[in-house]
Image (tube, rainbow, N blue to C red):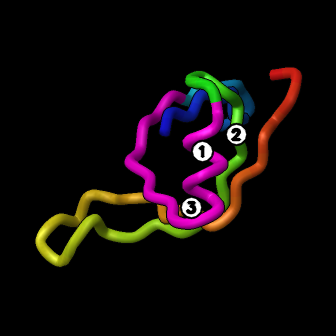
Amino acid sequence: MRHESEQAEAGGKRKVNAEIAAIAFDAQARLIRAAALESALRLEGFLCARSKRSRALVLHVTNVEFIEGV
């Protein structure tokens, strides 16, 4: 998943860009699969290590919300 936003930091604005791996199951996976590429979504979930051997973070999606007009 790709995140782009503008955040307040030290009295100024900072552009934030990041990519993170995400995994979803059941209804959440079907919602994401049905979304067009570049769709604006709000994802909720938790961060977890990819595996016992890899400390890379993965977002485990537990809720999906479509954002209209973005």
Tag shown at residue 49: none
Q: Earlier in the sequence, mark 2 or mark 1?
A: 1
C-alpha gap between disc 2 and disc 1: 9 Å
Position in image of residue 23 (x %, y %): 44, 58
Q: Earlier in the sequence, mark 3 or mark 2?
A: 2
Label 3, secondary structure: give it: strand
In-image side of 52 versus 1 (left or right): left
Q: Is residue 15 visible?
A: no
Label 2, secondary structure: give it: strand
Position in image of residue 56 (x %, y %): 26, 58
At a point 81% along the width and 35% down the height, the residue shown is: 67
- Pointer 1 residue: 32
Q: Are marks 3 and 1 in contact (CB under 8 Å)?
A: yes
- Pointer 3 residue: 61
In-image side of 49 versus 60 (left or right): left
Give, as a single range, the part of the protein colored magenta. Answer: 17-35
**Kind of residue at disc 1:** Ile
- Pointer 2 residue: 41
Q: Earlier in the sequence, mark 3 or mark 1?
A: 1
At a point 66% along the width and 52% down the height, the residue shown is: 43
Q: Are marks 3 and 2 in contact (CB under 8 Å)?
A: no
Label 1, secondary structure: give it: helix
Q: Nearer the viewer, residue 3 or 13?
A: 3
Q: Is residue 32 visible?
A: yes
Position in image of residue 37 (x %, y %): 56, 24
Tag nearer the camera, 3 or 1: 1
**Kind of residue at disc 2:** Leu
Q: Residues within 10 Å of mark 1 (few under 14, many from 20)?
A: some
